[in-house]
Image (cartoon, helix red, strand yellow):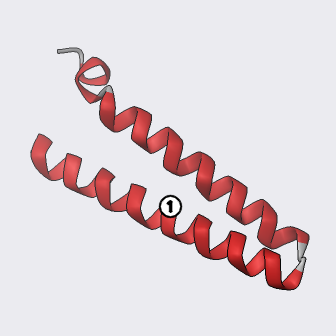
Amino acid sequence: MIPFHRLLISTAIAFCAGFAAWAAWSYRESGDALTLVMALAFAVAAVALTYYLRHLNRFLGR
């Protein structure tokens, strides 16, 4: 079960990082503040998920 969880978290990291990059690129073209907020939020989510994945054993109590 843990390897599958790692795969799901890795997929979520890739999605969040990709969406943050796309939103940042879109913000540069449009200048829309909401797009910038989405880019920052998904970048923070990618960083938080990366931290979680790197320290998964500690979160599981191992």
The residue beneath circle 1 is 17
Q: Kindly give the residue lying farthest to the bottom in the view shown.
A: 30
In the visual, does 51 lie left or right of 60?
right
- Residue drawn at x 24%, y 23% as measured from the top left: 60
Say which element carries label 1. Answer: helix
Q: Position of residue 32 (x, y in %)?
A: 89, 77
- Residue drawn at x 55%, y 49% as measured from the top left: 45
- Badge 1 local density, few (<14 within 10 Å), some, or many (20+)? some
In the rendered view, would you say 43 is above or below 32?
A: above
- Residue drawn at x 60%, y 65% as measured from the top left: 20
Q: Nearer the viewer, residue 5 or 39?
A: 39
Quadrant location of the N terminus? top left
Q: Position of residue 28 (x, y in %)?
A: 81, 76
In the rendered view, would you say 17 is above or below 47?
A: below
Residue flagged by tag 1: what amino acid is it?
Ala
In the rendered view, would you say 14 is above or below 53?
A: below
- Residue drawn at x 28%, y 29% as measured from the top left: 56
The image quadrant of residue 61 is top left
Task: Give the total number of marks visible in the rendering.
Answer: 1
Quadrant location of the C terminus? top left
Q: Position of residue 13 (x, y in %)?
A: 41, 55
